[in-house]
Image: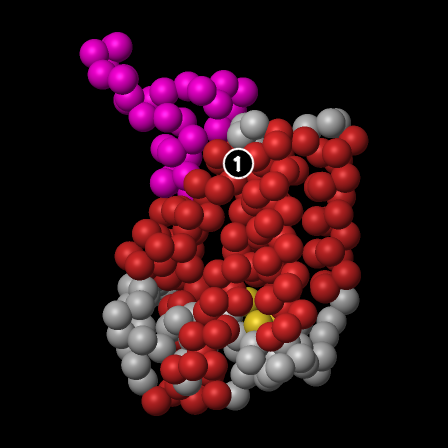
Amino acid sequence: MELTTLKFFHLKFWGDGSDAAKGWVNDIIVRDTSNFNWTFIFILAVVFYVYWSELHKKNYEAVFAGLALYGVHWLYEIGNAIIGKCTGYPLWAVSNPTSTFILLEGVSWELSMMFSLAGIISFKMMGQDRNKRMFTFKGKWKGISVRLVVAIEMALLFALFESFLAACNGGQSFIWVYKWWGVIPVFITTYIPFFLASNYVCDWKPKLRKWFLIGLWGTVALLLVILIPCGVI
């Protein structure tokens, strides 16, 4: 029997600034339905099921966590699209052949729906006692909040998985153009804030939490309503 060596896992840590990467970004057509298929509907149904299940159980904190991360995610995606408009290339981008629908240059429908659930996942990863402190060394040290520990763990996991996506299909699936952009800045400047939002907002005082979510999603909606018709994003 002929043995075949399989390359199971490969990571890319930085953008390469190549002409190929720039060309893939230039070819992106946002909100184009040419690649539409029915997985779009199935993924949407799954997201609805998860949120309505949490609401049915009156697990509102999980819903708040999900909405907090997802709202921050949209602010980042809008900012990334603006960077792309102003400088020629966004910090990250997705290609049309790898998605059923591209919402903005840096986010496909599939990725966006995943982020709509990421906050709920992180919330559940904290367990029942969200005031627990870890690494206390038998009470000799105050330790670190489980909220922060899980946020860092989830951020690291997502950053590493993004590096895997950036290496897929010769770098065409998830595109990093700039040589200074990669796993480390993604981990620190993007994913840690995402998961801090989901892990802390859920237990804020109701009034503060309400106004944070209203302000967050109001800002997202306003930016989308203004910038999309103007052709900025």
| Residue wearing tag 1 | 201
Residue 25 located within the stretch drawn in magenta: no
Q: Position of residue 118 (x, y in %)?
A: 55, 46
Query: Hey, which quadrant is residue 184 in on the image?
Result: bottom left
Which residue is painted at 61% across and 44% down in the image?
213
Q: Position of residue 59 (x, y in %)?
A: 68, 28
Q: Which residues are magenta?
A: 126-154
Q: Is residue 15 left or right of residue 112?
A: left
Q: Is residue 38 left or right of residue 158?
A: right
Which residue is painted at 61% across and 41% down in the image?
211
Whether residue 6 is visible to the viewer of this picture, yes or no, is no
Of 227 and 158, nearer the camera is 227
Q: Position of residue 177 (x, y in %)?
A: 35, 77
**In the rendered image, the vertical position of residue 40 relative to residue 212, given as above or below:** below
**In the rendered image, the vertical position of residue 112 relative to residue 197, given as above or below:** below
| Residue type for callout 1 | Val
Quadrant where the N terminus is found in the figure: bottom left
